[in-house]
Amino acid sequence: MGFRRGKPLIQLFHVSKHYPGGQAALSDLTFEIGRGQFVFLTGASGAGKTTLLRLIFREEIPSSGQILVNGRNVASIPQRKIPYLRRTMGVVFQDFRLIARKTVFENVSYLPRILGVDLRGRKKLAYHALRRVGLAHRMSSFPPELSGGEQQRVAIARALINEPDILIADEPTGNLDPDLAREILRLFLAVNQRGTTVLLATHDREMIQRVGGRVLTLDRGQLALDREVVGTEQPELRLGDEEDPEAEGGRASGSAEDLGEGKDVKDESGGEDEGGLAAEAAEESQVDEAGEDAEH
Amino acid sequence: MSFLQALRSFFRDAAINLVRGWKVSLVAVLTIAVSLFLSGVFLLASRNLARSVERWQREARVVVYLTPQTTAAELAVWARRATGERWVQAVHPVDQRQAQERFRSIFPSLADLVSGGSEEPLPASLEIEVRPAASGSQEQLSALAAWRLAPGVTLIDDDREWLAQVQGLVAVIRGVGLVLGLVLLGAAVFTIGSVIRLAAFLHSEEISILRLVGATEFYIRGPFYAEGLLQGTLGGLFAAGGLYGAWLLVRQRAGDALVPSLLAADFLSPDQLAALVLLGTAAGLIGAIASLRGETLRSSS
């Protein structure tokens, strides 16, 4: 779990946001989030959670104060540089924001395509990202063919494909039933355990109590609380026993692959644990197979 | 992503959009095709007419009609007098007999009109070829003005007078074509802009995702610009094809009719045809740029 506090990755200094008409969405927020932390952002509807997230990924600019991400003041980043900032972040929304007419592969591989990665490279990246969320076998499916939980996992895979420094999630479990919400939360925890800073906005206090961690509570635009909560069901939420083949030594065991259908994929490519070219080649052929019909 | 990779990607996406929304795209393509076709018709007509006028100007003559009482000796004097003018290239005196013969050979069925009467209906005349360099010169105008007042001259027919009227007509056709072309082209640009705006609206969800994952404005707008460019180029090609078809049809059906054969004597030059297509391309691109300028895409994200 993300109790550790590393070097600051996100820093806010007296940040306020006022909308036309004088309404204050955020007032004088000051806090920082360390690299590798898992932070819940909570508060009632209208407390300013979404506004805060939008400020961090530079969808909006603060009326006053400074927001530093990776040491850069996001408000002063020129318009043309914003895309480069966003490439260091993954963003997940409650409504998934997947394109229904595009395959899962196409939905996931937007960023590699923008970056000019060739089809083979895109398939490989998409495969890895989807494997992390246990959906590598659905590369050629279309979003409407997937359940809500699967769609959210695809959205997470899209956010993760470029190994972002920060994963921002705005009510990612809001549209899901409790079981699916739990599954999605496990994914976020797994992502965090691989070193990605996670900032998750939710008004589900029960979930926060179960999982625990650092919790920032907003109340009418102000930071009401910044505390560490010890989770009641933490062990249950811990990931499975299998080693993540891509995880670095020293990190907590378990990964997203252990969830659901991802397990099958991992089993098939189990040779990777042993390393070596054969395993890599096998994986590549699997990638080709999985992505063969994904792009149309 | 390299520039060429990006272009390839833009045109691929644009082609997919064109096919997916072919009905709307067809409206835009046809609008620009019709506007360019009509502009092309005016261009073709004015070009052919202008060429004919040029040819006629090269062959332009001044005919000085003398009184019926003019004798052969007086005709010779007039011919010598005309030959002495610097603006005159050649003088062909035509006496009454020659005039009658010419009339009979051109209009055999009307031969009776000019034979057997007591009064000669066709007067003697001087047909004067004008030096091209001196055509319309002050010297020529002064001489003709003096001759008009001279005894023995009944009428002076200067081809330049009616050619000037035809030239005026060419200018009017060009002007009307230009204005109509501009108006229609403006409508075409507007139509293409609307189609692109609609396409951007339909893709607003995707645009917001692209923006979210870090796509640059160039990458987001590129496919729409390519779509406008393709629509404009297709419109230009349709217009060029339609114009050629119409030209062939007119030439086939015109026969000996003066006006159609005059207006459809030659087709547009390859340069003019290429310019017509490029005009369509430019109109498409302008329409796309205009429709996506400012905050259009931003507000849709």
Image: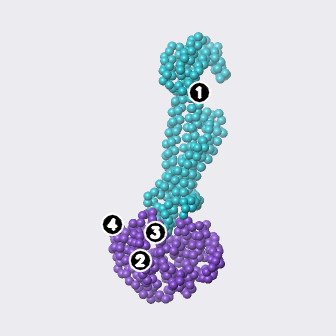
Q: Nearer the viewer, residue A116 or A240?
A: A116
Query: Chain A's shade in the image?
Result: purple
User: How crowded is the residue under tag 4: few (<14 C-alpha within 10 Å), some, or many (20+)?
Assistant: few
**Mark 3 highlights which residue?**
A85
Please say if the residues under marks 4 and 1 sit with CB atoms less than 8 Å apart.
no
Q: Tell me, yes or no, whether dots 4 and 2 are on the same chain.
A: yes
Residue placed under numbered mark 2 in the picture:
A8
Pointer 2: residues within 10 angstroms few (<14), some, or many (20+)?
some
User: Amino acid type of disc 2?
Assistant: Pro
Closer to the camera, B8 or A104?
B8
| Mark 3 burial class by Cα count in 10 Å: few <14, some 14-19, many 20+ | some
Amino acid type of the residue tagged 4 in the rendering: Gly
**Which circle, 3 or 1, is nearer the viewer?**
3
Residue at 42% across, 64% down? A78
Q: Secondary structure at mark 3?
A: helix
Quadrant location of residue A296?
Answer: bottom right
Chain hosting mark 1: B
Q: CA distance from mark 3 to mark 2?
A: 16 Å
Q: Which residue is mark 4?
A: A21
Query: Residue A279: horizontal and vertical position, in percent?
Result: 63, 79
- The residues bearing labels 1 and 2 have C-alpha atoms spaced at a distance of 90 Å
Please give the residue where the numbered disc 1 appears in the rendered image.
Answer: B59
The subunit letter for the residue under badge 3 reads: A
Say which mark, if any, is on residue A28: none
Q: Which chain letter matches label 4?
A: A
Q: Please say if the residues under marks 3 and 1 sit with CB atoms less than 8 Å apart.
A: no
